[in-house]
Amino acid sequence: MADQKRWFKLWDSATGDDALQTLPPAVRWAWAALGAYTKMHGTNGRVTISQTNAVLAAKMGVSPDALLVTVRMLPNVVIHGRIG
């Protein structure tokens, strides 16, 4: 099967990153899930998400109500614009 470019690069140094390692495992998974979601739906590492995005919340393993709270916890993630 041809590469559909539906992957993102996860450096092996992520396993030793202090900012990631201090997070609970479930939040680390949310970080990885956001990376995969950004690859699929974003452009050049940027993605626009709704604060009620149930699909992304499910991929991250959180409720839609906890989506933005969780995203704000993630290292190396910058939020631009208005957030409700």
Image: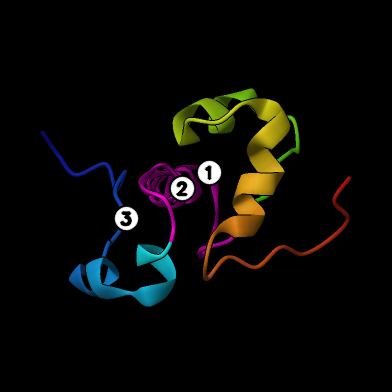
| Residue 38 located within the stretch drawn in magenta | yes
The image quarter containing residue 74 is bottom right
Q: Residue at x 40, y 52 (%)?
A: 28
From the viewer's perspective, is the residue at label 2 or at label 3 nearer? 2
Would you say the residues marked 2 and 3 are in contact, meaning their CB atoms lie under 8 Å apart?
A: no
Q: Is residue 83 left or right of residue 13?
A: right
Q: Measured from the top left, where is residue 19 in percent x and y?
A: 44, 72
Establish if 55 lies above or below 48. above
Q: Residue at x 62, y 26 (%)?
A: 63
Indicate which disc residue 8 carries: 3
Q: CA distance from mark 2 to mark 3?
A: 18 Å
Q: CA distance from mark 1 to mark 2?
A: 20 Å
Q: Which residue is mark 1?
A: 41
Q: Measured from the top left, where is residue 75 in percent x and y?
A: 52, 67
N-term-proximal mark, 1 vs 2: 2
Q: Measured from the top left, where is residue 56 in percent x and y?
A: 55, 33
Magenta stretch, residue numbers: 23-46
**Kind of residue sitting beneath label 2:** Val
Indicate which disc residue 11 carries: none
N-term-proximal mark, 3 vs 1: 3
Q: Residue at x 15, y 39 (%)?
A: 2
Establish if 53 lies above or below 70. above
User: Alpha-carbon neighbours of circle 3 within 10 Å: few (<14), some, or many (≥20)?
Assistant: some
Q: Nearer the viewer, residue 84 or 66?
A: 66
Q: Nearer the viewer, residue 63 or 21?
A: 21
Q: Nearer the viewer, residue 2 or 15?
A: 15
Secondary element at image label 2: helix
Secondary element at image label 3: loop
Would you say the residues marked 1 and 2 are in contact, meaning their CB atoms lie under 8 Å apart?
A: no
Q: Which residue is mark 2?
A: 27
Secondary element at image label 1: helix
